[in-house]
């Protein structure tokens, strides 16, 4: 579903991704861990081209992101085509970014109404199904300020799913939450994984990585230092840097 090939990204003098390659098969859950500043968020943002890349390529579902290829030459995609590519990729951030003046239901309806041009009635019905799926049917009429952080994040996940993505990117979705609210969000993500969604998850929740992850990637200083089955990497890391990191977070 995702192929990341030798991606490099720099901000000015600072090279943040130094040739990162990663394959994510359809239906797989890949967890990405690593120290703060190692390039995890940048990597996710390079997948849906919230960032341009300096070298390498990214394919999602067989399509080269950001470019079209004609006769061996790369052409920058027109903004409209890039928008279409992005619509097929859901992204959930540490901060939920819900529209504060809209109810939970309206937040979930917004994308389908404005982007997919679904009728209000059809979008509302679909939004309600998604709110049920994340356990919030009874909060449909609440505004974000009336919801806990965990509930807001579940609405944000439902909102992403409303666009019917092929791929979901999660950037530390539970890091801003009070500890007692983390599990309800992880449970929604586990259910989503079980339903067959392809997911790349940047997280510090090693329990989630161990149970729900198919593959674990440890990234440090812009390179993938170590990767493999989560249980193996977590129980017997091969590299000193991985050991040092896991020693701090486990
Ligand atoms: P992580 O998510 O692993 O904490 P990031 O990908 O957010 O790391 O950041 C990696 C490095 O790139 C950091 O040093 C950060 O300061 C830098 N960085 C990220 N985004 C930008 C930007 N837009 N401009 C300049 N530097 C950035
Ligand atoms: Mg980050």
Image (cartoon, rainbow, N blue to C red):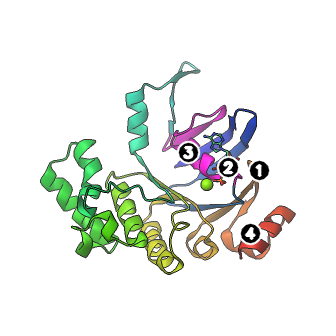
Marks counted in the figure total: 4
Q: Is residue 217 magenta?
A: no
Q: Which mark is residue 39?
A: 2
Residue 101 location (% of width, % of height): 27, 55
Dot 1: what SS? loop
Q: Is residue 50 above or below residue 27?
A: above
Task: Give the foreground label among 1 and 4.
Answer: 1
| Residue bearing mark 3 | 45
Q: Are marks 2 and 1 in contact (CB under 8 Å)?
A: yes
Q: Are marks 3 and 4 in contact (CB under 8 Å)?
A: no
Q: Are marks 1 and 4 in contact (CB under 8 Å)?
A: no
| Residue bearing mark 1 | 221
Q: Earlier in the sequence, mark 1 or mark 4?
A: 1
| Residue positioned 52% across, 66% down in the render | 176
Q: Earlier in the sequence, mark 2 or mark 1?
A: 2
Q: Is residue 231 above or below residue 62?
A: below
Residue 243 location (% of width, % of height): 81, 69
Tell me where the magenta segment starts and ends, as one range: 37-62
| Residue bearing mark 4 | 233
Task: Give the foreground label among 3 and 4.
Answer: 3
Q: Earlier in the sequence, mark 2 or mark 4?
A: 2
Q: CA distance from mark 2 to mark 3?
A: 10 Å
Disc 2 beta carbon < 8 A from ligand 1?
yes
Q: Is residue 160 above or below residue 231?
A: above
Dot 4: what SS? helix
Dot 2: what SS? loop
Disc 3 beta carbon < 8 A from ligand 1?
yes
| Residue positioned 59% across, 21% down in the render | 72
Disc 1 beta carbon < 8 A from ligand 1?
no
Instruction: Give the side of residue 79 with respect to residue 226, left or right.
Output: left
Q: CA distance from mark 2 to mark 1?
A: 7 Å
| Residue positioned 49% across, 73% down in the render | 186
């Amino acid at each position: 579903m995702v192929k990341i090939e030798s991606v490099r990204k720099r901000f000015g003098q600072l090279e943040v991704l130094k040739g990162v390659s990663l394959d994510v098969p359809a239906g797989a859950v890949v967890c990405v861990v690593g120290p703060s500043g190692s390039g995890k968020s940048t990597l996710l943002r390079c997948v849906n081209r919230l960032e341009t890349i300096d070298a390498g390529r990214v394919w999602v579902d067989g399509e080269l992101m950001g470019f079209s290829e004609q006769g061996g030459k790369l052409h920058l995609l027109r903004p409209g085509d890039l928008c279409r590519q992005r619509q097929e990729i859901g992204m959930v951030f540490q901060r939920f970014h819900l529209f504060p003046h809209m109810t939970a239901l309206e937040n979930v309806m917004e994308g389908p109404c404005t982007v997919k041009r679904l009728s209000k009635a059809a979008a509302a019905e679909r939004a309600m199904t998604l709110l049920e799926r994340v356990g919030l049917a009874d909060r449909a009429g609440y505004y974000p300020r009336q919801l806990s952080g965990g509930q807001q994040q579940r609405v944000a996940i439902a909102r992403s799913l409303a666009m019917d993505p092929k791929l979901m990117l999660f950037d530390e979705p539970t890091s801003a939450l009070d500890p007692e609210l983390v599990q309800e969000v992880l449970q929604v993500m586990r259910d989503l994984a079980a339903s067959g969604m392809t997911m790349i998850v940047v997280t510090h929740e090693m329990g989630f990585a161990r149970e729900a992850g198919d593959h674990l990637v440890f990234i440090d200083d812009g390179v993938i230092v170590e990767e493999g089955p989560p249980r193996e990497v977590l129980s017997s890391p091969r590299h000193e840097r991985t050991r040092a990191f896991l020693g701090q977070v486990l």
